[in-house]
Amino acid sequence: YCARAGIRSLILSPQGAGGQVSYTNEVENYPGFSGTGAELAEKMYKQAQSSGVIFAGEQAQEIRRTADMWEVRTRRGRYRAKAVIVATGASPRKIGAEGEERLTGAGVSYCATCDGAFYKGKTVMVVGGGNTAFSDALYLSRFCSRVYLVHRSENFRASKVLTERVRACGKILIRTNETVEKIQGETAVKSVVLKHTLSSRISVAETEAVFAAVGREPQSGLVRGICTLDENGYIVTDEKMRTDKPGLYAAGDVRNTPLRQIITAAADGAVAAEDLAQNL
Ligand code: NAP
């Protein structure tokens, strides 16, 4: 939308294009598309490139306002722009269990799509009660022998359709009202200590992997102190994706929005681009 409006547009993205979409196993709720997140990200990347957008594999380290422009600093230097759209997304939250940090990369994972294939035919555990946990559990159930789905209450945030699919899947064992106290194993995950929230009963479940899907935290550090964030750190915008600083916009999961999906993130970008094109 920016490039098509004739604006010289640069995307700073250190890990290639796509963000969280690239790690999504199956996208089935973006209109007109069906396939993996990586495929969708690649299509979007090519489309943006052919519209004239320039991609730089650099990380924005600082944003600041100068007299008439915004300035974004990266390791290589400084970019000056009339407007900046912050679309830095969100990153996985930690469970907060003993052993989690030590065994990250040795069975503890925050990306089922990336690491699930290592556990073909094995027992694995997914922690969380939202859409990510449920779609991860379904994905893993395709090739793992058993999938524990552990959630700290009986109320799921996951959509009805995913909940029904999980309930109907014979390989997924739902364990509610349980919290992960400790992840055990010398050099790799072997088992997990669970505590029942009502009875305080402790049990041990053997598993070779723990996939944490307990929500995300906004990556809004770049603009902390520059524009207003809500109490959870999400960037506050108006309906045109404007922050409270002129020329500074936010789009996607980093913004305080009631729905965080690919369709809403894409729409946010379009709305922001349209507004900034009119006001440059
Ligand atoms: P989410 O909806 O925020 O759910 C996080 C889950 O983790 C909640 O069930 C929460 O429990 C639990 N939790 C939080 N902290 C925990 C902790 N320390 N220990 C144990 N459990 C903890 O996050 P999400 O599932 O990652 O989804 C994020 C956004 O992406 C949502 O808007 C979602 O709709 C979207 N998304 C959509 C799709 C799709 O449409 N197919 C797929 C993936 C993600 P409580 O409920 O008790 O707080």
Image: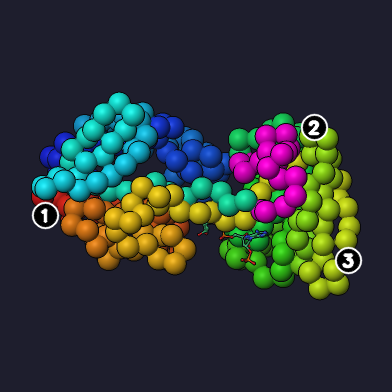
Distance between mark 1 and mark 2 Cα atoms: 56 Å
Residue 120 in percent (x, y) is at 76, 34
* Mark number displayed over residue 279: 1
Residue range in magenta is: 95-112
Residue 215, quarter of picture: bottom right
Q: Residues within 10 Å of mark 3 (few under 14, many from 20)?
A: few
99 in magenta: yes
Of callouts 3 and 1, the N-terminal one: 3
Q: Amino acid at mark 3?
A: Arg
Mark 2 = which residue?
187
Mark 3 = which residue?
201
Q: Residues within 10 Å of mark 1 (few under 14, many from 20)?
A: few
Of the two numbered discs 1 and 2 in the rendering, the one whose residue sits closer to the viewer: 2
Residue 202 in view (yes/no): yes
Residue in the image at 44% along x and 32% along y: 15
Q: Residues within 10 Å of mark 2 (few under 14, many from 20)?
A: few
Q: Amino acid at mark 2?
A: Thr
- Outermost residue, top side: 76
Looking at the picture, does residue 137 appear above or below residue 4?
A: below
Of callouts 2 and 3, the N-terminal one: 2
Q: Main secondary structure of the magenta part?
A: loop
Residue in the image at 40% along x and 50% along y: 221
Residue 209, quarter of picture: top right
Q: Amino acid at mark 1?
A: Asn
